């Protein structure tokens, strides 16, 4: 029997990562309500998203799909990242 840890990146965690890695402050409630808005509407550019991907890869010790750094919205990003974390890919 293997121990499978179910990692999940939350909206709150994404908000904290946006602030810590890119200096972009977005309230988690606003981020949740506007999860289908483009990242650039929050002031996060592709370099900022790349920093978030790198931080998550380091934290969880696994490479995320290349598409993660090309996601356009928080909803798409969370779906892709959480799917990858769940399957361990």
Image (tube, rainbow, N blue to C red):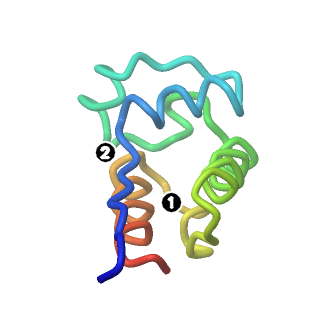
Label of residue 50 in the image? none
> Where is residue 78 shown, x and y percent of the image?
38, 53
Would you place residue 70 above or below residue 28 in this image? below
Residue 56, relative to residue 25: is it above or below? below
**Along the horizontal axis of the image, is 15 left or right of 17?**
left
Judged from this view, the residue extending furthest toward the left is: 33
Who's the residue at 43% across and 66% down the image? Answer: 85
21 in relation to 51, above or below: above
The quadrant holding residue 35 is top left
Give neighbour class at mark 2: few <14, some 14-19, many 20+ (Cα, 10 Å).
Answer: few
Residue 46, image x, y percentages: 69, 50
Q: Residue at x 28, y 31 (%)?
A: 32
25 over 88 or under it: above or below: above
Task: Classify mark 1: helix, strand or loop.
Answer: loop
From the image, tell me which residue sits under label 1.
Answer: 71
Q: Residue at horizontal 37%, vertical 78%?
A: 87
In the rendered image, residue 77, in percent from the top left (x then y), is placed at: 44, 56
Q: Secondary structure at mark 2?
A: loop
Asked if marks 1 and 2 touch (Cβ < 8 Å), the reply is no
Looking at the picture, tell me which residue is in the foreground, 26 or 87: 87
Q: Is disc 1 surrounded by few (<14), some (14 to 19) or many (20+) residues within 10 Å?
A: some
In the rendered image, the quadrant that contains the N terminus is bottom left
At x 45% / y 34%, what residue is drawn? 13
Residue identifier under label 2: 36
x and y, in percent, of residue 74 in the image: 41, 45
- Is tag 1's residue or tag 2's residue first in the polypeptide sequence? 2
């Amino acid at each position: 029997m293997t121990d499978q840890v179910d990692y999940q990146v939350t909206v709150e965690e994404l908000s904290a990562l946006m602030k810590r890695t890119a200096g972009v402050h977005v309230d988690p409630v606003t981020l949740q309500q506007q999860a289908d808005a483009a990242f650039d509407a929050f002031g996060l550019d592709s370099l900022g998203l790349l920093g978030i991907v790198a931080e998550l890869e380091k934290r969880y010790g696994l490479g995320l799909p290349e598409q993660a750094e090309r996601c356009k919205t928080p909803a798409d990003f969370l779906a892709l990242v959480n799917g990858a974390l769940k399957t361990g890919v």
